């Protein structure tokens, strides 16, 4: 009995209970779909729009206009892939949502990428930590961010696969990792922030290799597609960055940042029917203050990492880079799968890490408590239900809370990083440090700094 108790870890019980909560939410969503014919909130508000992130853009993999007409911010690689995995003839006589009934190859590709992402997630976390791999991998694979990306048919799932290969425990070759990182950025350009953060750990050669690979993949895909020049991509990114603003409640539907909430408070939406002027100002201040405070603390943590790079694990600084980028401009809530990978690689130690892990589990729950807002039900066509349905809409608190959770997690891990660096400085001091022993020159011909030796065992313990 004593042996059994010693092998049961309390935190594992907690994590498996959260996994059971995710399973219960999945069962509830399934029952609701069977009864009503569509996926309720927090899934996409238009029941007819399943997989339309893929099909609405696939036409531009076969004809020009993605950048000058559609104004897309995707690099050319996305359209090259869409052009390969689909039937060209379906796009000659079908438009918009109707093309799904013809181009079944696109559906197969969407489902296949999701299944591959699920398998690779379990393999990665199994190699990372066999004691916690199942609940954490399950939370990502069947949690809301991944399911939402799958329901939308977004290339974020494909980008996540390459993200796992680039920064996970699945491949050892550095050059293959660089190529995978290049694929991530060429699918989701905002992930360049995560690619650059290893610089604070003096990983010059890795960042140099990834940047070169990014350029090569971009040039090849640009030539294959025939459009998507640097001028076109930069122009559209500039327009998108300066032009987004929420104008209705539906724009808050599972976002990756507090940008929609902040811009809705600044819009002409009739907020004063529900809120006073003072409440609107407080909501705006909360959105702006939490965003800037968390970003500032994460930048401080990255600066601290530069001082003691061996104290901070790589997956955490990649998390900081990704969260800073995702909280600055709105990119869609499914992008949280990139963040979840890093969060669930944290050890259950102390109190800051467990708090971050528990918030991540809550963010993965694929359900919500819907509060009615007086909006009448709407008759809609459901693609998955293959019939007309009566859809009801309301406000889901978890949809509003998920970006807040991610910013709070950023604050927790940033504070942890600053504490660990400060503790290392107090214990180790500044003398006799061999911090640069694995450095390589960023550019050919530039010598790396002089290096000294530190014990491998001590380094590994500090990184963990």
Image (cartoon, helix red, strand yellow):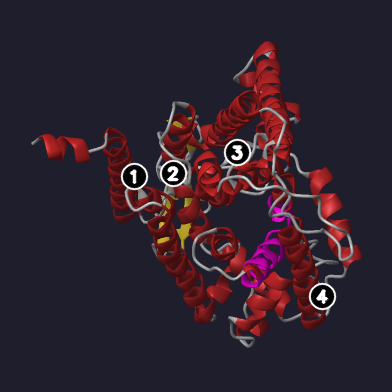
Q: Nearer the viewer, mark 3 or mark 4?
A: 3
Question: Can residue 159 be found in the magenta stretch?
Answer: no
Give the CA separation, mark 4 to mark 1.
42 Å
Q: Are marks 3 and 1 in contact (CB under 8 Å)?
A: no
Give the CA separation, mark 3 to mark 4.
37 Å
The residue wearing badge 3 is: 311
Residue drawn at x 59%, y 20% is 274
Give the CA separation, mark 2 to mark 3.
29 Å
Who is closer to the viewer here, 389 or 132? 132
| Circle 4 residues within 10 Å: few <14, some 14–19, many ≥20 | some
Label drawn at residue 219: 4
Helix, strand or loop under label 1: helix
Question: Can residue 177 be found in the magenta stretch?
Answer: yes
The residue wearing badge 2 is: 364
Give the CA separation, mark 3 to mark 1.
33 Å
Who is closer to the viewer here, 400 or 298? 298
Helix, strand or loop under label 2: helix
The residue wearing badge 1 is: 22
Magenta segment: 175-195
Give the vertical position of 259 relative to 115 (above or below).
above
In the shown orientation, is residue 84 left or right of residue 223? left
Tell me residue 203's x, y (percent): 72, 54
Q: Quadrant of residue 3?
A: top left
Give the vertical position of 169 relative to 248 (above or below).
below
State which tag comes first along the sequence, 3 or 1.
1
């Amino acid at each position: 009995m004593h042996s059994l108790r010693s092998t049961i870890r309390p935190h594992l019980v907690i994590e498996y209970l959260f996994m059971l909560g995710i399973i219960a939410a999945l069962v509830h969503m399934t029952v609701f779909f069977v009864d009503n014919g569509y996926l309720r909130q927090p899934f996409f508000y238009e029941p007819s729009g399943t997989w339309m992130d893929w099909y609405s853009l696939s036409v531009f993999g076969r004809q020009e206009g993605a950048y000058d007409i559609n104004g897309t911010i995707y690099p050319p690689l996305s359209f090259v892939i869409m052009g390969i995995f689909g039937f060209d003839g379906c796009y000659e006589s079908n438009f918009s949502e109707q093309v799904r009934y013809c181009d079944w190859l696109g559906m197969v590709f969407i489902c296949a990428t999701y299944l591959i992402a699920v398998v690779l997630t379990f393999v990665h976390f199994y190699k990372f930590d066999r004691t916690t791999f199942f609940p954490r991998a399950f939370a990502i694979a069947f949690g809301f961010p991944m399911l939402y990306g799958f329901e939308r048919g977004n290339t974020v799932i494909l980008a996540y696969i390459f993200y796992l290969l680039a920064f996970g425990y699945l491949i050892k070759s550095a050059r293959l990792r660089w190529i995978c990182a290049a694929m991530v950025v060429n699918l989701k350009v905002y992930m360049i922030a995560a690619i650059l953060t290893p610089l604070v750990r003096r990983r010059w050669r890795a960042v140099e290799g990834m940047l070169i690979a990014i350029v090569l993949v971009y040039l090849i895909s640009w030539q294959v597609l025939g459009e998507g020049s640097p001028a076109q991509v930069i122009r559209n990114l500039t327009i998108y960055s300066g032009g987004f603003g929420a104008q209705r409640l539906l724009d808050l539907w599972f976002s990756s940042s507090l940008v929609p909430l902040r811009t809705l408070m600044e819009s002409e939406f009739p907020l004063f029917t529900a809120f006073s002027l003072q409440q609107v100002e407080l909501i705006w201040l909360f959105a702006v203050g939490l965003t800037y405070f968390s970003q500032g603390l994460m930048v401080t943590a990255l600066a601290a990492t530069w001082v003691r790079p061996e104290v901070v694990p790589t997956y955490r600084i990649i998390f900081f880079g990704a969260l800073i980028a995702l909280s600055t401009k709105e990119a869609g809530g499914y992008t949280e799968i990139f963040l979840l990978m890093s969060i669930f690689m944290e050890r259950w130690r102390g109190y800051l890490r467990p708090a971050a892990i528990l918030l991540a589990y809550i963010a993965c729950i694929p359900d919500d408590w819907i509060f009615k807002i007086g909006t009448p039900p709407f008759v809609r066509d459901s693609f998955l239900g293959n019939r007309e349905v009566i859809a009801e809409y309301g406000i889901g608190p978890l949809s509003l809370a998920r970006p807040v959770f991610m910013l709070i997690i950023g604050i927790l891990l940033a504070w942890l990083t600053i504490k660990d660096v400060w503790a290392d400085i107090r214990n180790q001091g500044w003398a006799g440090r061999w911090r640069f022993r694995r450095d390589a020159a960023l550019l050919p011909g530039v010598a790396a700094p002089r290096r000294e030796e530190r014990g491998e065992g001590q380094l590994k313990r500090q990184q963990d």
